[in-house]
Image: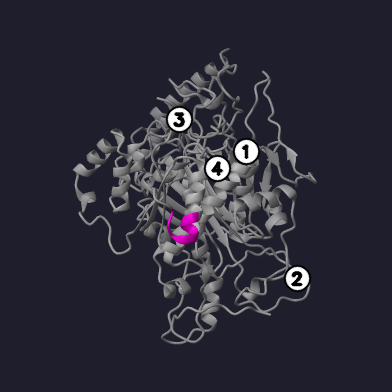
Amino acid sequence: MDEREILTRFKAGTLGRDEAARLLTGTRQARTDTRTRPETAPRPTEPYARPPAAPPGDPDTQPPVQPPAAAPAEPYAQPSVRPDADPPAPLDAEPSAPPPGPWYAEPGAVPSPGRPAVEDRYAVVGIAGRYPLAPDLHAHWENLRTGRDTSRAVPVTRPGLAPAPPGRRGHFLDDVAGFDPEFFGITPDEGALTDPQERLFLEVAWEALESAGCTGSRLDALTSPGGPPRALGVFVGASSHDYALLAAASWTDGRPAPAAGHGGLPGRLASALELTGPARAVDTAECSALTALHLAVGALRREECAAAVVGGVELLLHPSRIREGAGEGVGAVVLKPLRRALDDGDRVHAVIRDTADGRTAGSRTHRRTDGAHETRESTARRIGSAGAATGIAALTAAVLQVRHGVLAPGDGRDAAAPWPRTCDDTGRELPRTATVEIAADGGCAARAVVEEHPAAEAPTGEEPGGDDGPFLLSAPTPAHLAATARRFADWLAGAADAGHPAGALPAGLARALRAGRAALPCRLALPASDAPGVIAALRRFADTGSAGDEARTADLRGGADPMDLGGLPQTRDYLTALWRAGHREQVTRLWLNGVDVDWAALEAPSPGAAPAEPPPSVHLRRPLWLSTDGAGAPREPEPTG
């Protein structure tokens, strides 16, 4: 029995104080003996050596190092904590020494360059965001890399804001009044009454889930042990209520008003996707998103969910908050336990090695690194004082720098610089490691350690005949489908210009679209033959609504699966038999008729690295704002100034 199991059993009341103390003494003596063993040199098959780290913390339970004089009554039981999992350490605990060998190899684990040991670490498998002068993370990374000043005057198209004093500047998002209600099955009236922070987070969270390949049948496969499908948690940081203030200023009796509080931020996504994991909104000022991250890691560790969306959002919608240097932003990441992410064949952008919450957070997480160190101040220089979005913006900056191997300007650097890996005493390379540390004025603080993950060598294209399945796209309406087809055609053409082998689709792309994207009512199926053919068919469909003789389309808004095959238990076996026999066309036709095809079950994860990340679905946004002349009627906002 190791120390963590002893503490877990003691806290659960199944182990007495004296017995726990005796066992802890023996365990620590054994650990001391272990540290003196000579077999601590890194093994040559491992990609990087692991520096010492503190044991991971848990947001809900922080047991003491020594058993107390009397065990207090527990208000809540924790039956879902794994007996073999490390219990949380107190925030002021000293970092423990690592077990012999880098990467914290577990008993029986055989580390290798493509698959290191993954004890209690959490993979960032999806990421998305919108920041000042950056509608997506590609533009945001370019702003970070070049040190671009993103401040400007208040946009004249921003509704609800009187012209700011001359010379006052802030860091603003574009089109905060825009929303695509049809994409999410929301009426325009309901969309107009929904806080733009909630609307914007809904769009960005969807993009992060698409980045992770978790909006299709792979979402159904997210289950906790013994739990229901779609065990995805949602944890969001938010702190402002500007839209409610604007509504209150013009409210009259009988007119509907936006909902109070921030419960709709996680709740809207959880309801739309029928998720079964926890959904929590967090307000700890600038620390909100990092606190949400800490809670999500705890929920994953306790197996309350199989994956989690973590995000934060801040919009400046009320005139009282337009101050010099104020900022906005919205971002989201998708987390999975690292072992599961590797088993699922996910793309791993970075790894969350540790999190902590509270003013003493820094005393138990990894100390300041020689690389990226993201703080409230560094974030404010880039996107302004962004309130509850500060934590997610800092986390995103850390992930992007770790992923690209480049240090952004700041922290004494006037320009971006290559980020070399450091080495241990044996000459082995250590993974790039970044710290994210946010302290709010009100006394809250939170911290996270972000680490590089050694990626397998990326394949360059599909092997001839490597994927004879269909290239599938779907959307809620024909207009959405046409816009998404055009976006993919442009993206594939850009990939070819960037050096992909002539005629080859990015490796694994068609498979990733089948299993990782939601099957929406309007559908398009193409042969995944070669890039030029797919690009031409997509552009033809976007322009004319027809993609050629070999392409097939369907509009299922009037009803899907007329024979109700999806409700028969034999259908899954039938689809599997068809697929294994090579009858791709028949399976595709059934999908076009609305049969629910579990593509992830038909196809095992692709070996090697994940494919190049495809672009997100298109949102056809239009302005929706509070009504001033009717009960709840949406209106297009009038420009100010």
Specify whether residue 504 is painted magenta: no
Question: With respect to residue 27, does 386 lie above or below?
Answer: below
Amino acid at dot 1: Gly
Name the residue at 52% across, 80% down: 248
Q: Residue furthest front?
A: 549
> In the rendered image, is residue 107 in sight?
yes
Query: Considering the numbered disc 4 on the image, is that residue within a helix, a strand or a loop?
Result: strand
Closer to the chain start, of discs 3 and 2, is 2
Image coordinates of residue 319 in percent, x first then y, are 64, 75
Q: Quick one: label 3, few (<14), some, or many (20+) residues within 10 Å?
A: few
Q: Nearer the viewer, mark 2 or mark 1?
A: 1
Distance (Cα) linking label 1 and label 4: 39 Å
Amino acid at dot 3: Pro
Amino acid at dot 4: Thr
Closer to the chain start, of discs 4 and 2, is 2
Amino acid at dot 2: Arg
Name the residue at 45% across, 81% down: 633
Closer to the chain start, of discs 1 and 4, is 4
User: Contact, CB < 8 Å: mark 3 with mark 1?
Assistant: no
Image coordinates of residue 519 in percent, x first then y, are 37, 52
Q: Which residue is mark 3?
A: 607
Distance (Cα) linking label 3 and label 2: 53 Å
Query: Considering the numbered disc 2 on the image, is that residue within a helix, a strand or a loop?
Result: loop
Q: Which residue is mark 4?
A: 355
Q: Nearer the viewer, mark 3 or mark 4?
A: 3
Query: Considering the numbered disc 3 on the image, is that residue within a helix, a strand or a loop?
Result: loop
Residue 168's label in the rendered image is 2
Residues shaded magenta: 540-547
